[in-house]
């Protein structure tokens, strides 16, 4: 299993508030997209994935109207 630093950003949809909730954690997984799908289970989820430099993966998710971004960086 690969080890990643995960940065999870949740966009604030309130007007006139540009702040985001940002969470950091270290995880182990084989497939970042599958990890996000399991994490957001039971909801209507739309995902798009972008490969990055040095094996990093960025996944943009819309879940019940909430916009989230997951950045997986290999450790």
Image: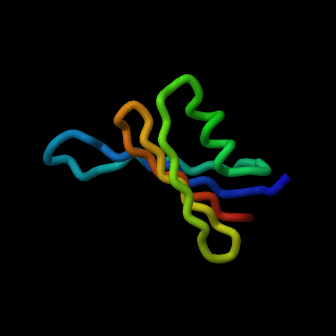
**How many tags in the picture?**
0
* Foreground pick, 13 / 34: 34
* Quadrant of the rendered image containing residue 72: bottom right
Judge from the rendering whether residue 70 lies leftward or rightward of residue 25; answer left or right. left
In the picture shown, does residue 51 fall above or below 20?
A: below
Q: Residue, x 61% and y 42% (percent of image)?
A: 36
Residue 21: x and y in percent read 40, 45
* Foreground pick, 39 / 22: 39
Q: Residue, x 26% and y 41% (percent of image)?
A: 13
* Foreground pick, 62 / 15: 62
Residue 27: x and y in percent read 72, 48
Q: Residue furthest right?
A: 1
What colour scheme has been applied to the protein in the rendered image? rainbow
Q: Residue furthest top?
A: 42
Judge from the rendering whether residue 22 lies leftward or rightward of residue 65; answer left or right. right
Q: Residue, x 56% and y 51% (percent of image)?
A: 24
């Amino acid at each position: 299993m690969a080890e990643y630093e995960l940065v999870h950003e949740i966009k604030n949809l309130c007007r006139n508030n540009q702040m985001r909730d940002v969470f950091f954690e270290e995880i182990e997984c084989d497939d970042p997209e599958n990890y996000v799908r399991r994490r957001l289970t039971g909801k209507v989820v739309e995902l798009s994935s972008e490969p990055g430099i040095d094996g990093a993966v960025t996944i943009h998710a819309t879940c019940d109207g909430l916009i989230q971004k997951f950045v997986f960086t290999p450790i």
